[in-house]
Image (spheres, rainbow, N blue to C red):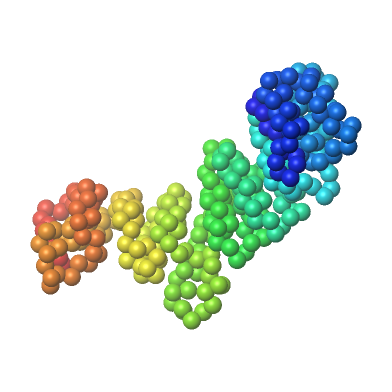
Amino acid sequence: MESILIATVNGRQDKNDVLLKELVDAKNWRQALANCEKRFRKGDRSDGFLVNKAHVLLSYPDKSRQEQGTAELNAILGRDPPIIDIRILLAIDEAAEARHAQDDRIASMWDRAASAAPANEDLYMMWFKQKFERRDYKAAQKDSSNQAAMMYQKNFPKERHPFFLAIVSSHLAGISLKASETDRKLFTPLAYRLLSKSATDAVDCQRSPEKDASKYVRALQCTGDVRLLVAIYRSQGRYREAIAALDDPHIGLGSRICGRSWDLVREKIELYTLCELWEDLWAFCRDILVDARADSLHDAEYSPRFGYGVFGDDWKAWSGLMKASTSIATTEFVLCPP
């Protein structure tokens, strides 16, 4: 097993830590345990040392020693108040992951730490990061990324970051292959509701700029936010709602938020296709392609409808135009402004 050891003296490894690490790396468990027992007799009771000692016992090639390690680790995890040191929590978590441990106390470790230190934002972020990177989305688990994100955004209501983490993790918890039907019914609509509220806040904020902007900290604010909205709406089959969002003057294409994102133009072409709105697709692609013509680009009197310029000469727009014209059986069309 890979060595997972914590520096036990002011965040730095002293000579005892270095020696213990060398013994563990060499898998010299007898000497490693002797080193731990010697330090224990000398009165070392630091959390880092006790976790290291439990790690050595759990790795020891003897069942009775492994049981002793489990008992000592459970005693550490069951302590009240709980451990809130992020270094130690990470070491325990990584060791448990390496051993595929499913102990309930390990599962609730981050939850208990976060409850004991609700103002420690770094702790919430690390908890979420650990679970998210492992794609641990299953909502029923006490220490899933979704649980981390929900507690994070609840305790930091004025922060944007945890709110959008909650949206993403709810979405992933709902669409995960491991998700139960109950999870899908709970978390998929939750992601939709949170995003819809964020979109509504963005529109309200722009319609009434005199309002206190701090009240709209969770509103859509950038192209990435709108792309997230479109992606989640699309994954739930809400194609027309996604199109409506992209048509909205406050959050859609051409708005200050979107910044004329070409990626969202391509998304809109695909959404029209999914909805089979062929006439709308035809008109949209035609206008984009007209704006991209050389004579349009150099005509000072020509006022482009979308203003994407040469970006409009994209195969996505051409294929959309051909798909639309074929579907509505158009026999005569000209690339010119209406």
Q: Quadrant of residue 238?
A: bottom left
**Does 308 sit above or below residue 213?**
above
2 sits to left or right of 301: right
235 sits to left or right of 268: right
Q: Could you tell me how many numbered marks the image carries?
A: 0
Q: Quadrant of the N terminus?
A: top right
Tell me residue 317's x, y (percent). 23, 52
Tell me residue 98's x, y (percent). 65, 30
Q: Quadrant of the C terminus?
A: bottom left
Quick one: 291 or 159, which is closer to the camera? 159
Residue at (10, 62) in percent of width and height:
295
**Does 34 sit above or below residue 128?**
above
Residue at (47, 64) in percent of width and height:
220
Tell me residue 39's x, y (percent). 84, 32
Residue that sits furthest to the front in the current view: 15
Residue that sits furthest to the bottom in the current view: 210
Residue at (44, 77) in percent of width and height:
207
Q: Quadrant of residue 191?
A: bottom right
Tell me residue 144's x, y (percent). 64, 44
Quick one: 146 or 245, which is closer to the camera? 146
Quick one: 240 or 302, which is closer to the camera? 302
Residue 181 in view (yes/no): no
Residue at (70, 33) in percent of width and height:
5
Residue 8 in view (yes/no): yes
